[in-house]
Amino acid sequence: MSEAASARSRHSSPAAVPLGPLEPMLRAWLPRQRWFAGKGRAITRLRLVSAVELLPPGSTPGLLHLLVGVDCADGTADCYQLLLGVRPAPLPPGLAPALIGRAEHGPYAGHAVYEGLGDPRLAALLLERLRAPGSHGPLRFDRDPDAPIPADPAPRPLSGEQTNSSLIYGDSHILKVFRRVWPGTNPDLELPRALASAGCTRVPAPVAWYEAELPAGPSGGPGGGRRTAEPLTLGVLQPYLRGSEDGWQLALRRLAAGADFTAEAHALGRATAEVHSALASALPTVALGPAQAARLAAGMTARLAATVREVPALQPFEAGLRGAFDALAASRGTGVPAQRIHGDLHLGQTLRTADGSWALIDFEGEPARPLADRRRPEPAVRDIAGMLRSFDYAARSHRPFAPAWADACRAAFCEGYARTTGRDPREDPVLLRAYETDKAVYEARYESRHRPDWLHVPMAAIRRLAERERPARRMPHPSPPPPGSAAPHPHPKPPRRPLA
């Protein structure tokens, strides 16, 4: 029997691999991870949801797949996917930075426990599981039988700030490993597959993926009840695009060189429209009515109120900002179509390919939002507002501030979008203003929490958007960026290239 087949035939239950010996080290390690959503909140309990040994017991190294529930003092609860390597201590020098801790007792006593994705041998094993579909305990590996996956490509982790973890295999594929997981299909698997079925080539079809099928608890989530919960999407493998350029970095380089970006913005508008049209044809759409418009506006108003409490600088503008949401509620929806969308679109979620075309990536949506919200149809203008804010963000990274560059890009993007759909997004000013305002409020909270030196960037938009009537000119740049730096995007991510 091959090692893969042997490993597939055995798995460990939570009772066989208790979390107890690992809990102290995980309690200290989790809050330090970029993808951990509970920063600043006290952890009250760690719960073992699932444990699977992906290699036979006693293998060196071992690979332990965990789903761990994290309960915090404020009442929030999340589930995280961990892939832990296990080796006799001490670790080889190359793996030392990945160390989580050393087990003092239990089945791994005397062994070092570390981040398994940083170990090339274990990262290669994960790809092998995807090449050979099947079940391994609660884990299910699946793939597109018509898409080739090469054997034994050298893996390497994608560095930089991410809300998940990614591995690049050779120069052919990239695997996104979701860290914070929920029951239900992740949009980053669901939407690219739907787009492929619609014949859209702007987004690649997943090559392989893996999920967890767990019993459902009383609330329908993972927890040991008798009913079966929806599968949890754990990872998606896609082709890797060679020679592509990250849209955010490309825009910053053009700004630094004093170069025009309107042709690229126009083409990006057309690409976005193609994706929206394909999603609308592949998945159900609805029309906004009074109840839906009121719900959207209420959600935006609630997010504003919460952010004002957290970011006092917004207080003088709260009434004006709320006016944009009141106008949306008063519009009663007016039959605006709602559909599945990207949900977190900005320049950092785009790639310009080697042939000069644009691709859209990372369809997960805003990771902080509940999965059910991210899968709900919304007006396509939400994605458009995100991209318009991204052009403004780029322009404000430039010294001096380049408002004409941003205005030209915003206009070109909308014109490119209209060229494909026949409708200019600016023809829905109430809806567009509401979504731009909601995005700017989100940015203000993000910068206040993570990069207070850049709070001035969304605050400039806050001042403009708070006016009842859109001003003819932009507000002046409130303060220059720190010397020698360029504005990071509100969702900093390293370039990802999921095409071939």
Image (cartoon, rainbow, N blue to C red):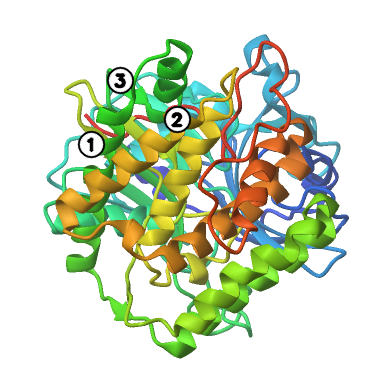
Query: To which residue does mark 3 refer?
Result: 171
Q: Position of residue 136 (x, y in %)?
A: 43, 54
Q: Nearer the viewer, mark 3 or mark 1?
A: 1
Residue contact between numbered discs 1 and 2, judged by CB atoms under 8 Å: no
Q: Secondary structure at mark 3?
A: loop
User: Which is nearer the eye, 2 or 396?
Assistant: 396
Q: Quadrant of the N terminus?
A: top left
On screen, residue 307 versus residue 204, left or right, reads right
Query: To which residue does mark 2 refer?
Result: 404
Query: Counting other residues with Cα less than 10 Å from the Cα at mark 1, is it few (<14), some (14-19), or many (20 or more)?
Result: many
User: Which is nearer the eye, 19 or 94?
Assistant: 94
Residue 369 seen in the figure:
yes
- Which quadrant holds residue 222? bottom right
The residue drawn where x is 83% and y is 61% is 309
Q: Position of residue 73 (x, y in %)?
A: 87, 64
How far apart marks 2 and 3 lie (CA) works out to 39 Å
- Which quadrant holds residue 346? top left
- State the count of labels: 3
Query: To which residue does mark 1 refer?
Result: 267
Residue contact between numbered discs 2 and 3, judged by CB atoms under 8 Å: no
Q: Position of residue 349 (x, y in %)?
A: 41, 39
